[in-house]
Amino acid sequence: MLMVVEKLPPDTYHELIDIWERSVRATHHFLPEDYIVQLKPLILENYFYAVDLFGVRDVEGRIQGFLGLSADKIEMLFIDSGIRGKGIGKALMHFAVFEKHIRKVDVNEQNEHAVAFYKKLGFAVTNRLTTDSLGKPYPILEMELVNDLWK
């Protein structure tokens, strides 16, 4: 099935934050509840506005997954928790790499499935930060595309 990636406007942000929360709860088991609650308004009110957001919709028009891009990095990639493993993440990554020429991504080290996903797509760890962007003890792996496995 062909997946169309589209730019997402601010009127979709409340739908995106719901996807973000479901995805984080399904994949970020290492984050305590109070930290997820702390992050949610920061994501919705600040981080979404700091990136270019793109997403994939189902046939009914519901967003299934999205990514946020800065000038040179994938800043966020979240797939709705009930539909992971259907190729949405790979389609979004393909868009980021081939349409937007992005070659870098940061990922929580403790999110082992995400680390494996990026490695499978040709990314390698180039640096390890001991804390996340808020200074919390959730190590971040900086990764860069070193092997273009899609060609």
Image (cartoon, grey):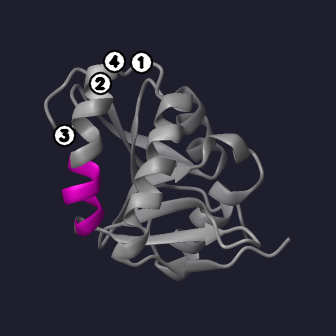
- Disc with the residue nearer the chain's start (3 vs 4): 4
Mark 2 touches mark 1? (CB < 8 Å): yes
Residue under pointer 1 = 30
Residue type (three-letter) at the residue carrying disc 3:
Ser
Question: Residue 43 magenta-drawn?
Answer: yes
- Disc with the residue nearer the chain's start (2 vs 3): 3
Which-is-in-front pick, marks 3 and 1? 1
- Determine which of the numbered discs, if any, sits on residue 138 in the image: 2
Q: Where residue 11 sits: x, y (%)? A: 38, 74
Between 58 and 109, the one lying in front of the other is: 58
Residue type (three-letter) at the residue carrying disc 4:
Pro
Q: Which image quarter holds the N terminus?
A: bottom right
Between 83 and 85, the one lying in front of the other is: 83
Mark 3 touches mark 1? (CB < 8 Å): no
Name the element at disc 4: loop
Could one spot residue 94 in this view of the protein? no
Which segment did they paint magenta? 42-49
Q: Where residue 14 sits: x, y (%)? A: 39, 59
Q: Which image quarter holds the C terminus?
A: bottom right
Which-is-in-front pick, marks 2 and 1? 1
Mark 2 touches mark 3? (CB < 8 Å): no
The answer for how far apart the CA atoms under marks 3 and 4 are is 16 Å
- Disc with the residue nearer the chain's start (3 vs 1): 1
Residue under pointer 3 = 133
The answer for how far apart the CA atoms under marks 2 and 1 are is 8 Å
- Disc with the residue nearer the chain's start (4 vs 2): 4
